[in-house]
Image (cartoon, helix red, strand yellow):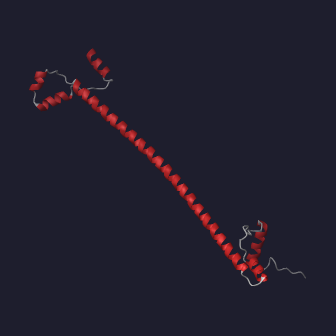
Amino acid sequence: MADKNDDSASTGGAFRPQNRKKLTQRELNMLPPSQRSKYLAYEDPPKSAALAMANSKKRVQERMKAEKERFRNENAIDEEREKYSQLIGQLKAAEARNRLRIMRLHYQNNRAEEIRHLISCQPTAIKAVRLQAMVPPIPEKKSPGDSLDKLERSRIESILEDENGLTINRDLS
């Protein structure tokens, strides 16, 4: 009885199938191959086989660990590539903005130079002053914008929407 308890304690309390009858090596060799394989299926493997299985399991675990490490390294490399490509994209966008700014300035300078030339080529000073007043060489940077506040804007909109003119037509008699 104590023998069974020791076996269950060593396996962690789980049921472990085993052969009821113990055969000697000679009796085992005399069995047909199918019965021998059935008998050996419930026996503990020999030390060499257990060592081979342990080594095999260890190799599989090391291979899995190496695979995980390689996968982590690839992800790190992918993240670095993504950061690098984002940085390159930002640099290219900045260069494009700079090229546009330079082209805009070049266009404005050429236009101003051409208008100055037209003004200087006028036959009389009065015509030159008029042309300069109508077409300034450098446009004003300040846009006129909206000079109306909300109250004035709503008043103008109500006047425009009034089809009968009741808002502005008054009898003063």
Residue in the foreground of this view, choosing between 109 and 25 = 109
Q: Indicate the quadrant containing the C terminus: top left, top right, bottom left or bottom right.
A: bottom right
Taking the image as drawn, is residue 162 in sight? no
Q: Quick check: 73 above or below 43?
A: below
Query: Quadrant location of residue 155?
Result: bottom right
Q: Is residue 138 left or right of residue 37?
A: right
Q: Quick check: 15 above or below 147?
A: above
The image shows a total of numbered marks equal to 0
Q: Quick check: 53 above or below 150?
A: above
Residue in the foreground of this view, choosing between 48 and 3 = 48
Query: Quadrant location of residue 106?
Result: bottom right
Q: Quick check: 47 above or below 79?
A: above
At 59% from the left and 61% from the top, the residue drawn is 98
Residue in the foreground of this view, choosing between 71 and 15 = 71
Question: Which residue is most to the right?
Answer: 173
Query: Quadrant location of residue 18?
Result: top left
At 31% from the left and 35% from the top, the residue drawn is 60
- Rendered location of residue 59, percent (x, y): 30, 33
Taking the image as drawn, is residue 157 in sight? yes
Q: Is residue 134 left or right of residue 39?
A: right
Residue in the foreground of this view, choosing between 84 and 38 = 84
Q: Is residue 93 left or right of residue 51?
A: right
- Rendered location of residue 122, percent (x, y): 73, 82
Question: Which residue is most to the top?
Answer: 2
- Rendered location of residue 82, percent (x, y): 48, 50
Q: Is residue 73 left or right of residue 127?
A: left
Q: Indicate the quadrant containing the N terminus: top left, top right, bottom left or bottom right.
A: top left
- Rendered location of residue 110, percent (x, y): 65, 72
